Image (cartoon, rainbow, N blue to C red):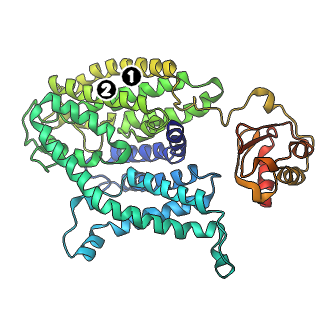
């Protein structure tokens, strides 16, 4: 299970890498025109729309990223299948479609389908259908739809079943969260802490929006965000469901990025720095935390639980302090500066004190836990792509990549014996159906450096740094 979650975490790295640039574009646009959101400045509008095109479609990016990442060979067909699944769920469970099917008004839950959870589910459906059916052979009359072409058809059928399940389950889950949020309002600072904890805990499945609507808007009469800016609340109380996010987003998570960078493997620090530095900037300035959180929530779920607990404590403590700050977008530096003159603001500049304390706590906690439990945060993943130095120095004896691929395939028992194929930095990684058909002597005659057989169905052929060229030829033969 943990291995599956780690693979899911790696799959999310591709779409997550798109988010920091969106956050920066939106942050600059929001800074230029904080009151009109582009209505007063064409440059701000241009930047906000550009960044919003990515942020608003984050769930689609997740569907495609998971579809590709969870497929056996990173094939684009899996991404297409994931997109098909996503489009079907969004269409079949849309409020308009619900009203058409039932003749009644759609529950509010169906207006909240554009979230990360549905994106991940769609990606998993697409990848699962691809992995299972991409080699399917149909009768001659249907031969056109054999292999990868049948994946979309199977995905559509599987999505219909999932959609029917979601039609009954999704409103129950959504309404349950709203009711729960309304119930904890009366508990004061403890309730604020519980809300903060659940807010972070629900981000992986996108249901934090349901909970946010209870506290930030006028679903249950709280309207913390609206009252903060309109002055319709109570000074010293209003803002308690927003203030505690500032120490997390401006200080805690950027410090966590620093801890993850310092604990990354030396050979992977540059790669980790590219993701973590841009994500930290997005969190500090704009308050967009998904690039950081999705970089470790599946790779190291224990660490994400610690993050959620710390977030809850922050909201509980800040609700007790004589500090109130709010936001229109999220709890970043830009919103903090803008909220200094808001009607319900109360010494917002003092947020720096708990913020710096939280930076130290996050750095120390993340660094200790990562090292102590050897968690697979960015730059510390299992070395599927990082092979021993001696393998990187291997020189393929033959420069004819097509011939090497042909001999290897013959030694593996032919294309009919190959279940899946991929490659890492120096190795072909293959799954075979019948291990008895593998002829190691034949494979070695291709001039490869060595063969490793981790299990009865797994074969790894050490090629060297030119493995990609051999793999490309190998795929052509398949």
Name the residue beneath numbered marker 1: 362
Q: How many marks?
A: 2
Q: Residue at x 33, y 35 (%)?
A: 332
- Tell me: 15 left or right of 406: left
Q: Position of residue 456 (x, y in %)?
A: 72, 42
Q: Mark 2 points at which residue?
A: 310
Is residue 146 depicted above or below 359 in this figure?
below
**Is 118 on the left-hand or right-hand side of 225?**
right
Residue 343 visible within the image: no
Residue count near mark 2 (Cα–Cα under 10 Å), binned few <14, some 14–19, many ≥20: many
User: Which numbered disc, 2 or 1, marks the residue that appears first in the sequence?
Assistant: 2
Mark 2 secondary-structure assignment: helix
Contact, CB < 8 Å: mark 2 with mark 1?
A: yes
Q: In this view, does 81 lie above or below 23?
A: below
Residue at 62% over, 29% down:
268
Identify which residue is drawn at 63% across, 23% down: 266
Instruction: Characterize the local packing of mark 1: few (<14), some (14-19) or many (20 or more) Cα atoms within 10 angstroms.
Output: many
Disc 2 versus disc 1: nearer the observer: 2
Q: Position of residue 194 (x, y in %)?
A: 22, 33
- Compared with residue 347, is residue 10 higher up or lower down, i.e. above or below? below
238 w.r.t. 162: above or below: above
List x then y, in percent, for residue 374.
53, 23
**For the point 21% across and 76% down, which residue is it?**
103
Residue extending farthest bottom: 141
Q: Is residue 334 left or right of residue 47?
A: left
Quarter of the figure with the C terminus: bottom right
């Amino acid at each position: 299970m943990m291995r599956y979650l780690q693979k899911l975490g790696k799959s999310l790295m591709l779409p997550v890498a798109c988010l920091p640039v969106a956050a920066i574009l939106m942050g600059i646009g929001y800074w230029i025109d904080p009151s009109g959101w582009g209505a007063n400045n064409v440059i701000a509008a241009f930047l906000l729309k550009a960044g919003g095109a990515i942020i608003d479609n984050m769930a689609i990016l997740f569907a495609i990223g998971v579809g590709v990442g969870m497929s056996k060979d990173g094939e684009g067909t899996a991404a297409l299948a994931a997109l098909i699944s996503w489009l079907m769920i969004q269409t079949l469970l849309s409020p308009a479609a619900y009203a058409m099917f039932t003749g009644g008004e759609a529950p509010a839950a169906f207006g909240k389908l554009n979230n990360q959870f549905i994106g991940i589910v769609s990606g998993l459906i697409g990848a699962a259908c691809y992995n299972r059916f991409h080699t399917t052979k149909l009768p001659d009359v249907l031969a056109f739809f054999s292999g990868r072409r049948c994946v979309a058809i199977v995905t559509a059928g599987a999505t219909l079943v999932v959609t029917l399940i979601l039609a009954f389950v999704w409103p129950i889950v959504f309404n349950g969260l709203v009711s729960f949020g309304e119930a904890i309002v009366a508990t004061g600072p403890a309730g604020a802490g519980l809300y903060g904890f659940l807010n972070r805990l629900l981000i992986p499945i996108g249901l934090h929006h349901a909970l946010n609507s209870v506290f930030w808007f006028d679903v249950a009469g709280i309207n913390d965000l609206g009252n903060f800016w309109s002055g319709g609340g109570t000074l010293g109380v209003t803002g308690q469901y927003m203030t505690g996010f500032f120490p997390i987003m401006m200080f805690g998570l950027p410090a966590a990025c620093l801890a993850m960078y310092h604990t990354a493997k030396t050979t992977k620090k540059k790669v980790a720095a590219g993701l973590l530095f841009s994500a930290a900037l997005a969190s500090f300035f704009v308050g967009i935390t998904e690039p950081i959180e999705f970089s470790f929530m599946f790779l190291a779920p224990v660490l994400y639980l610690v993050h959620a607990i710390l977030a809850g404590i922050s909201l509980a403590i800040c609700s007790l302090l004589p500090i109130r700050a709010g936001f229109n977008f999220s709890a970043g530096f830009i919103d903090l500066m803008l909220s200094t003159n808001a009607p319900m603001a109360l010494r917002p500049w003092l947020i720096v004190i708990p913020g710096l304390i939280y930076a130290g706590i996050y750095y120390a906690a993340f660094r200790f836990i990562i090292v102590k439990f050897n968690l697979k945060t960015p730059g510390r993943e299992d070395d599927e792509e990082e092979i021993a130095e001696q393998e990187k120095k291997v020189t393929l004896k033959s420069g004819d990549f097509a011939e090497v691929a042909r001999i290897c395939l013959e030694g593996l028992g032919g294309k009919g014996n190959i279940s899946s194929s991929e490659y890492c930095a120096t190795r072909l990684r293959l799954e075979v159906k019948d291990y008895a058909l593998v002829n190691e002597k034949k494979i070695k005659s291709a001039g490869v450096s060595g063969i490793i057989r981790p299990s009865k169905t797994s074969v790894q052929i050490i090629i060297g740094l030119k493995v990609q060229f051999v793999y490309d030829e190998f795929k052509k033969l398949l």
